[in-house]
Structure formats: structure tokens, C-alpha cells
Image (cartoon, helix red, strand yellow):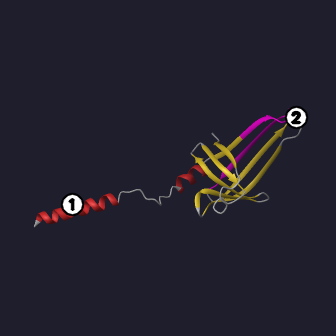
Amino acid sequence: MKRPIILTLTLLIAIILPSSCHDDDMYDDRGDIFMNLTSVTWFTETSGRLPDRREFYACDYWDFFGDGTGVWESYYEEEGFPPRELRCYFDWDFTPEDYSIISLYIPGVGEEYWMIDRLTPTIFSAYVSQFDPNYTPDPPHDYQILYALQD
């Protein structure tokens, strides 16, 4: 009598245990994305020469806050002209359809969609488009790479 019960229990364990240990296809790593995005100031900078040989320098700083707001600061300097600075506040959120897409609303500029390519604690790269990629297949976009500002 003990043998059939032990055999039945062994079979049940063999069937139930492996099926309960599989990866969850609905695993939500939004927490890691959120933490990497909101824990640092992101920046990018570029410099060079314009076609008329004047030098220029530009940098942008992006802060994404945990409450869905943020600030974008831009600085542009061109030889022969005074520097220009711009500060814009924005609202952001992940799109409901895909949390690897960030929707930004910048007053006076409009809506942008950042399709995350890579987001680590030190590098953030994304495809930036004016069109929601959830509704516009393969939208026109620019590629940008931002780096974490080290204190």
C-alpha cells in the first residue's frame, strides 16, 4: 500500500515541480529600467566645426524624476555669438503598450517617444521619434546616446 502512494507522490512532484520553476513570460523588469533612468543626470555633448569653419559646442542634460516629471537643460555655444541656454520642464511616462518606450511631453516642443535601445546605470541610448511606435510602424527617428553624469 505504501509503494503506490509513494509512486503517486513522486509522479506528482515530478510533474508539478518543473512546471512551477519556469521563467515567467510576463516578468516585469520595469523596476530596473525605472531605477536606472531616474537615479542619475544624463548628458550628451558634441563639438566641432561648422561649414564656415567656426567652432561650436553643445551639451544637453536630462533629469528624469520618479514622479513622472523632469528637466532638460541645453547649452549651445558658437564662435562669434553669445552662448544660448535653454531649460524646459517635461512630463514623462512609459507607454501603456510597451514599457521600453518612454513618452515625453515637453511644453512648447511637443511629444517625443524614446525607444530604449540600452539603459544601464551609466549608458542610455534610445531611438527618438515624434511618432508613437506603438501605432506607427518603423517611425522616422534619430539615435542618441546619453551618459550618466559622474559626481
Q: Could you tell me the amino acid type at mark 2? A: Asp
Closer-to-camera residue (128/42):
128
- Whether residues under marks 2 and 1 lie with C-beta atoms below 8 angstroms apart, the answer is no
Left or right: 8 as drawn, with respect to 137: left
Q: Which residue is mark 1?
A: 10
Q: Residue at x 66, y 54 (%)?
A: 114
Q: Residue at x 38, y 57 (%)?
A: 22
Quarter in which the N terminus is drawn = bottom left
Quarter in which the C terminus is drawn = top right
Closer-to-camera residue (29/66):
29
Left or right: 39 as drawn, with respect to 83: left
Task: Classify 73 as above or below 11.
Answer: above
Left or right: 49 as drawn, with respect to 29: right
Q: Residue furthest front?
A: 137
Q: Residue at x 63, y 46 (%)?
A: 125
Q: Which mark is residue 52?
A: 2
Instruction: Indicate the position of residue 43 as horizontal and vertical percent values.
Output: 68, 43
Residue 58, by quadrant, is: top right
Q: Is residue 35 magenta?
A: no
What is the span of residues highlighted in magenta in the rendered image?
A: 45-65
Q: Tell which circle, 2 or 1, labels the residue nearer the N-terminal end.
A: 1
Q: Residue furthest left?
A: 1
Q: Is residue 57 magenta?
A: yes
Instruction: Indicate the position of residue 37 as horizontal and vertical percent values.
Output: 60, 51
Q: Residue at x 71, y 53 (%)?
A: 140
Q: Secondary structure at mark 2?
A: loop
Q: CA distance from mark 2 to mark 1?
A: 80 Å
